[in-house]
């Protein structure tokens, strides 16, 4: 009942949209019911699944690589001052640069296939993970570190048992941003140059004025993005079950 | 000595690049040497055409950002001070947060036409989210003691809003701006790479298609410099307007 109340504005907008359609809308704006009809029809055919799996096969490996690299380097920079002084300024300075501009270069180096796209996604996902892991490691309560040292724990033990768990909340926050970013970059790279995938589908649909396909692709990516986010939040709840307060 | 450390990594990377470019192992088109990139960069920024493209991109990004800056703060403040508005709008924003709004770009092209407006509309939408969310958080967390003190001394609601709520929320507003401005730059480049006839993103794609990879990389550098400069301007502006709470770290 509460979720219904929370979604009330969204539902009201959808109803308004449907009513507007009855009144008369331009060709390129379909009503919610029509979109749903096309979407379920597409679910019945194999084509949509091919595009979805092509897209996911690019975004998920890219997300994984970027996350692992970002967390590893971010934690390392958070604990080791020398590494921090060398790496962090470079990361923070190149942060405002749109990583997508490297796509043409990556396409030159790694070909126009999936590898260049996976690497671009990995590059884009790296930044939020690095920044969050970095600040997460640096925000470890010093008193916990001192307690550990006091009880004779070695440096590696302190890192794995104190620093990493302290950094986990921020790391999961970074993962939410990174996952959303992976979908966006995947979609963008497919719109720029691809032969399969949801971004490619929406471009093809746009060029052939197939509005139904456009909205199907749009709805698919919306669902993927939302579902991915929900899954991540579930994972975070399980992993951070020891946290008393809501993050 | 420690100030020079970041340069060590950059210097190594640049040296490795130049070595690879000159080694003859790769086609010079794949690996343009730094010299030719630098030459193209100078040529680009000193030409009227280049500056015009840069201005087009900048103008689109700033237009979308400015709209979002005003509307977003208004919505965020409303949500922060009115729990009814918050209950209504918060699910909308947090529910659609994970949806890539870039997917709406083709529809925007149909609605607003090919040209600046569709890009500005998308930039507006993308920048809106961080600004609204952060401003909402800030407006919610204004210290109640300050408000009570003002009420105690007889201040009207308008005065409280102007003299307490707005200054207290200002650091949050600017935090939202600092997140949204790179987003604006990124979205403008992406949309120009996807579908445009002008702007820096278009020049990147066009240079690649004409196999002028040195010009392409020069424009990439130009985009990076532009993004950096714009961010610095924002930080300077923030330090002047929010003078009681200077940013103590150079980064973020």
Image: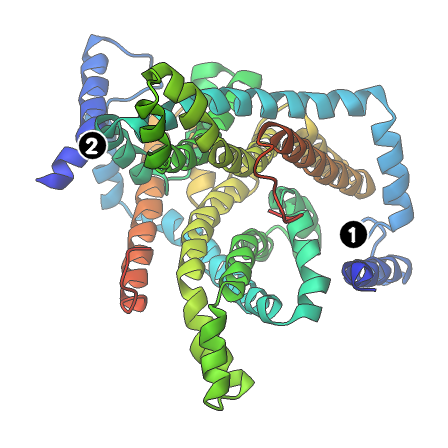
Q: Residue furthest bottom?
A: A152
Disc 2 residue crowd, few under 14, some 14–19, many 20+, Cα 10 Å: some
Q: How many marks?
A: 2
Residue B116 appears in the figure: yes
Is B176 left or right of A219, judged from the image as shown?
A: right
Residue A207 appears in the figure: no
Q: What's the CA distance linking mark 1 and mark 2?
A: 47 Å
Which structural element holds mark 2? helix
- Residue B35, placed above or below residue A233: above
Q: Residue B173 at x, y = what percent?
A: 48, 32
Q: In front: A1, or A201?
A: A1
Identify which residue is drawn at 36% across, 46% down. A225
> Which quadrant holds residue B57?
top right
Which residue carries the number 1 mark?
Answer: B30
- Residue A134, placed above or below residue B163: below
Q: Which chain carries label 1?
A: B
Which residue carries the number 2 mark?
Answer: A37
Which structural element holds mark 1? loop
Q: Which residue lies furthest to the left in this view?
A: A1
- Residue A242, placed above or below residue B93: below
């Amino acid at each position: 009942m509460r979720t219904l109340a929370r979604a009330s504005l969204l539902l009201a907008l959808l109803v308004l949209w449907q009513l507007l359609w009855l009144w008369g809308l331009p060709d390129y704006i379909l009503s919610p019911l029509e979109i749903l009809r096309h979407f379920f029809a597409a679910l019945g055919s194999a084509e949509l699944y091919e595009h979805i799996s092509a897209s996911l096969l690019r975004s998920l490996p890219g997300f994984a690589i970027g996350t692992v690299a970002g967390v590893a380097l971010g934690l390392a920079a958070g604990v080791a001052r020398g590494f921090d002084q060398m790496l962090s300024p470079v990361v923070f300075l190149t942060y405002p640069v749109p990583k997508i501009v490297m796509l043409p270069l990556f396409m030159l180096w790694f070909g126009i296939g999936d590898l260049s796209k996976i690497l671009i996604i990995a590059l884009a996902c790296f930044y939020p993970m690095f920044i969050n892991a970095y600040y997460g490691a640096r925000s470890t309560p010093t008193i916990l570190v001192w307690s550990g040292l006091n009880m004779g724990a070695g440096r590696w033990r302190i890192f794995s048992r104190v620093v990493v768990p302290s950094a986990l909340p921020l790391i999961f926050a970074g993962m939410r941003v990174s996952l959303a970013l992976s979908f966006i970059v995947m979609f963008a790279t497919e719109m720029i140059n691809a032969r399969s995938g949801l971004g490619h589908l929406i471009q093809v649909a746009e060029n052939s004025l197939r509005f139904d396909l456009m909205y199907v692709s749009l709805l698919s990516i919306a669902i993927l993005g939302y579902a991915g986010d929900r899954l991540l939040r579930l994972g975070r709840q399980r992993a951070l079950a020891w946290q008393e307060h809501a993050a | 000595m420690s100030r020079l450390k970041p340069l060590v990594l950059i210097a190594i990377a640049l040296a490795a690049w130049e070595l690879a470019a000159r080694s003859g192992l790769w086609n010079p088109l794949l690996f343009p040497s730094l010299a030719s990139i630098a030459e193209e960069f100078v040529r680009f920024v000193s030409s009227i055409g280049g500056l015009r493209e840069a201005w087009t991109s900048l103008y689109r990004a700033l237009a979308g950002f400015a709209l979002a800056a005003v509307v977003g703060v208004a919505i965020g403040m409303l949500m922060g001070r009115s729990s009814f508005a918050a209950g209504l709008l918060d699910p909308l924003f947090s529910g659609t947060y994970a949806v890539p709004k870039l997917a709406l770009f083709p529809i925007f092209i149909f609605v607003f036409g090919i040209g600046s407006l569709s890009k500005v509309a998308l930039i507006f939408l993308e920048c809106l989210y961080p600004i609204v969310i952060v401003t909402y958080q800030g407006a919610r967390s204004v210290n109640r003691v300050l408000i009570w003190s003002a009420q105690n001394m007889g201040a009207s609601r308008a005065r409280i809003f102007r003299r307490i709520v707005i200054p207290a929320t200002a650091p949050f507003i600017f935090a939202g701006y600092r997140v949204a401005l790179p987003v604006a730059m990124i979205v403008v480049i992406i949309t120009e790479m996807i579908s445009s006839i002008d702007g820096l993103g278009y020049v990147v794609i066009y240079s690649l298609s004409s196999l002028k990879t040195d010009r392409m990389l020069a424009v990439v550098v130009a985009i990076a410099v532009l993004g950096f400069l714009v961010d610095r301007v924002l930080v300077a502006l923030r330090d002047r307007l929010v003078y009681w709470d200077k940013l103590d770290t150079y980064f973020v």
